[in-house]
Image (spheres, rainbow, N blue to C red):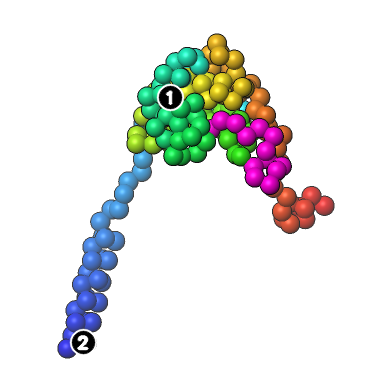
Amino acid sequence: MFWRKFILSAAILTAASSAVQASEFGRPASPEEIELWDIDVRPDGQGLPAGAGTVAQGKVIFEQKCAACHGEGGQGGIKDRLVGGQGTLASARPVKTVGSFWPYATTLFDYIRRAMPYPAPGSLKSDETYAVTAYILDLNGIMPANATLSKDNLAQVRMPNREGFVPEVTYTNIRNSR
């Protein structure tokens, strides 16, 4: 009885495998589909979309779409704290926030654009993403309250921990440098 079930199962799996191989599985993505997903932003600002947003606009959007997780003013929420922590990275209890840890403002923009807000990632328009980024940078004392962020100036924002990140040194890098 066991062998009969085993042989029948093997025959079914073989037939199913042949059917999958015979049919075309997937298709190449169209240029339009690729463009929808080609949204990475580099530290130097390459890849930033057109648009702009102010700190004041960002505050309104943050209160509506972000404060439920990150807390009022970016602190005290159920998710990551976004504000404070400057001067703690070398301590026994570092507080890693946007203001203390992140090396590039463009990385913040990219992350917000891709992953936020939690229940609807990627739903913010470019102007809204610039605005929320500006607000979070203002909360951390990195931008003035009257600031406007855009494609033209985001990459110039100097983050406090910009020099805190160094290239990884590996055995391969050392060996190849000789």
On-image quarter of the N terminus? bottom left
In the rendered image, is residue 97 in sight?
yes
Give, as a single range, the part of the protein colored magenta: 82-94
At 46% across and 39% down in the image, what residue appears?
A: 79
In the rendered image, is residue 130 in sight?
no
Instruction: Give residue 53's position: percent from left, percent from top.
Output: 48, 16
Question: Residue 30: within the magenta?
Answer: no
At 55% across and 14% down in the image, what residue appears?
A: 145
Residue 118, label in figure: none
Residue 2, label in figure: 2
- Kind of residue at disc 2: Phe
Q: CA distance from mark 2 to mark 1?
A: 62 Å
Disc number lying in front (2 or 1):
1
- Residue at the top extreme? 146
* On screen, residue 69 above or below 167: above
Residue, disc 1 = 62
Depth check, front residue: 176 or 132: 132
Q: How many marks?
A: 2
Instruction: Give residue 149's position: percent from left, percent from top.
Output: 53, 17
